[in-house]
Amino acid sequence: MEINCIQLGNNLFVELEGEFDLHTADYFRTETSDRLTAEIDNLILDLDGIDFIDSSGLGAILGVYKKINPKGGSIGVINITPHVERIFEVSGFLKIIDIYPSKQEVLEGI
């Protein structure tokens, strides 16, 4: 999996590409955790390049959520494929994560 992280104000914008599974979840945790500083409140995931996610990937996202939620932060997702959105729906993730149609809208809404 490839990860590109960019800080935009108090948001950490993360572009992901590849499979988000047992083999890549730790890489995601390391890359995002290293960048979750005191000034980062929100995580924005661009999932355009993710066609597959398993429970390890979901667990990695949940771990980040548990770090930012106590300080009032949230997670927004853009460019989600229908397959991955269905996995989020079935797993209950749509109760804690909001899906936005574009980068501009997530920055305005998060």
Image (tube, rainbow, N blue to C red):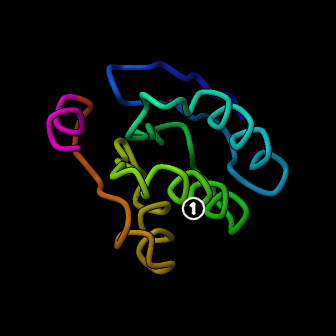
**Vertical order, 7 against 29 (above or below):** above
As drawn, the residue found furthest toward the right would be: 23
Quarter in which the C terminus is drawn? top left
Residue 94 image-quadrant placement: bottom left
Range of residues picked out in magenta:
104-110
Q: Nearer the viewer, residue 87 or 30?
A: 30
**Vertical order, 12 against 7 (above or below):** below
**Vertical order, 80 against 33 (above or below):** below
- Is residue 55 rendered to the left or right of residue 64? right
- Residue at the location (48% across, 63% down)? 83
Q: Position of residue 73 (x, y in %)?
A: 36, 48
Q: Position of residue 31 (x, y in %)?
A: 69, 31
* Magenta stretch secondary structure, dominant: helix
Q: Position of residue 102 (x, y in %)?
A: 23, 36
Residue 89 image-quadrant placement: bottom left
Quarter in which the N terminus is drawn? top right
**Vertical order, 14 against 57 (above or below):** above
- Residue at the location (37% across, 47% down)? 77
Residue 86 image-quadrant placement: bottom left
Does 83 appear in magenta? no
- Residue at the location (85% across, 49% down)? 23
Q: Residues within 10 Å of mark 1 (few under 14, many from 20)?
A: some
Q: Position of residue 91 (x, y in %)?
A: 51, 78
Name the element at disc 1.
helix
- Residue at the location (68% across, 50% down)? 20
- The residue type indicated by label 1 comes to Leu
* Residue at numbered disc 1: 62
The image shows a total of numbered marks equal to 1
